[in-house]
Image: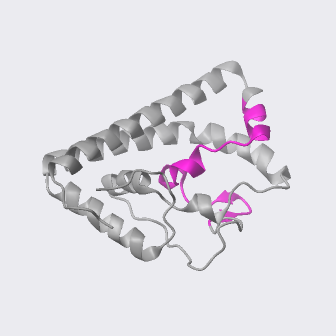
Amino acid sequence: MLKYDSEPISDPQRLSQIISYIRGIIARDPFVAELLYGKAMALKVAIDSIDGFIQACTAEVCPHCSNVCCINRHGYYDDEDLIYIISLGETLPYYKTGLSETDSCQFLRPTGCSVPRYLRPFRCNWYFCIPLIGFMRQRRGAEYRLFTSGMQEAIDLRAELIEIFKAIEVKHPEGPMW
C-alpha cells in the first residue's frame, strides 16, 4: 500500500519500486484503468486551462525575484503525483542524481520550467509566493475568478483520481511495499 504522505521521492530505486507498484495495481483491472485515465485526462485539461494565466503572471513576477522558490526538492514527485502521471500514460522527466535539494530546480530554465505544467509535481504547480499571489489578485476580476475556479476543479479532480486508486488498491492489495 502507498503511504500517501506527500513526501517527495528523490531516491531513484524507491521511485522505480513505486512506479512498478502503481502500474501493477492499475493493470489488474482494465475497466478501472480506463476510469483512471479519463479522470487523469480531465485533470490535465483543468491544469492546461489555467496554465496561460499562471504563465503570464510568473513571467512578470519571477524574473525579478531574488529568492528562487523553484528548488530541486519541489521538483520530485510524491505517491499521488505518480498515480496521476501513470494513469495518464505519461513518463517522468529524467532526473539527475546527487543534486542538493535546496539548489535551483534542475528543470528551471531562464524562460521558466522545462516540464509542461500538467506533468509537474502538485507541490510545484500550486505553490505561489506572496508577491505572485499579490500580482495575480491585481489582474482583472473575471480572469482571476476563472483561475481560482479552474484551480479548484483541478484540486477536486486530483482528489477523485486518488480516491479511485485507493479503492482499487484496497481491492487488490499486493502487501506492503517497504
Q: Quadrant of the C terminus?
A: bottom left
Left or right: residue 66 compared with residue 164: right
- 168 or 135, which lies in front? 168
Q: How many marks?
A: 0
- Please report the residue visible at 35 percent of the width from the left and 53 percent of the height from the top: 83
Instruction: Quadrant for residue 35, please give it.
Output: top left
- Give the x, y percent position of residue 109: 69, 64
Q: Please tell me whether residue 117 belongs to the stretch shown in magenta.
A: yes
Q: Is residue 98 in sight in this rendering? A: yes
Residue range of the region highlighted in magenta in the rendering = 107-136
Give above or below for 44 relative to 82: above
Q: Residue at x 56, y 37 (%)?
A: 50
Residue furthest to the top: 141
Q: Quadrant of the N terminus?
A: bottom left
User: Foreground: 24 or 140?
Assistant: 24
Q: Is residue 8 above or below residue 157?
A: below
Can you give x and y, in whole percent of width and height, for residue 139 in the image? 74, 27
Does the image show residue 114? Answer: no
In the drawing, does residue 87 fall left or right of residue 143?
A: left
**Left or right: residue 110 compared with residue 17:** right
The spot of residue 65 in percent (x, y) is 83, 51
Coloration of the structure image: one colour
Say left or right for 125 vs 14: right
